[in-house]
Amino acid sequence: MEKSKSNIVIKSIKIGLNVVFYSLITVLILFSIANTKLKTTQDIANIGGRGLLTVLTGSMDGDKEDSFSTNDLIFVKLLSENEKMNLQPGDIITYFKSNIQGLNRPGLITHRIFDVAEDLNGKRVYITLGDAAPNMPSEGSPSYAHFVETYLDAIPYDDVIAVYTGQVKNVGQVMKELQTPNGFALYIILPVFVLLIVQIALLIKNIMGINREKMQLQYQAEQQNVLANLEAEKEKMRQQILEELKKEQK
């Protein structure tokens, strides 16, 4: 009884691990396909409007509950035009910048909305600030202009792409590696291929086992049939002998 329960637990764990593994593989493959379809550096690979981004800098490394650091993986939700217009201070948004400070190349930035303003045309503008930025100096102080130029970004609402929804610590580099051709081949294609070979080998083994069992059952049935025929022949011969003896006695 205990052995049966143990086997059930082991089988359940194996099934659970297989479900998790293949689900992860499916998601990674879908994101890889989505990534190949990106037309510009302003696009975010997504499935149903939900995307993943690897954090490349420490500009959001802070003490807030939703702050994140370099090599974290963050989840974002792509926004409609209406949703872009209704963001509030404290929301963390992703937008495109032609030259990211520290990286010296264009790319996506994910920063927190510090304030909401309007431009000269009355268009909604979001003032963003990374959590790692120092405290803002008082307006009019010698360092205020430098702070504004270095740390604040004024983003028109329609330049916003997505809003932050969650994170996983320290797995962004892994995801980044998986999205490269070599990483995808090494960590996804190869394990899947190996698992496929193992599954095929197990399937062949099971089929051979089933066939062996069928052959054994068939052999046993044939043996039983032969024995039954022998018994019938012996009974027939016995009856014939008895008939002969009866004739001789007459």
Image (cartoon, helix red, strand yellow):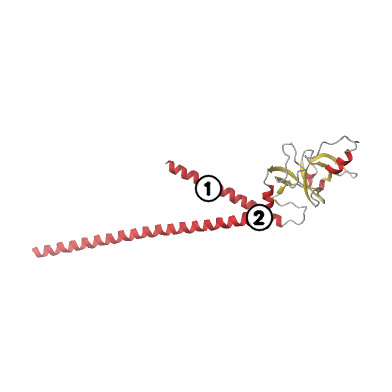
Who is closer to the viewer here, 97 or 86?
A: 97
Give the quadrant of the N terminus: top left
Residue, disc 2? 183
Residue at left offset 42%, top offset 59%: 211
In the displayed structure, 222 sits above or below 111; it is below
Q: Residue at x 60, y 57 (%)?
A: 190
| Mark 1 crowd level (few <14, some 14–19, many ≥20, 10 Å Cα) | few
Between 240 and 230, the one lying in front of the other is 230
Q: Is residue 176 left or right of residue 154?
A: left
Q: In this view, does 83 lie to the left or right of 216?
A: right
Q: Nearer the viewer, mark 2 or mark 1?
A: 2
Report the amino acid beneath label 2: Gly
Where is residue 170 drawn, in percent x and y?
68, 44
Do the residues under discs 2 and 1 have CB atoms within 8 angstroms? no
Q: Mark 1 points at which residue?
A: 14
Q: Quadrant of the C terminus?
A: bottom left
The numbered disc on residue 215 is none
Residue 239 drawn at (x, y percent): 18, 61
Q: Position of residue 163 (x, y in %)?
A: 75, 44
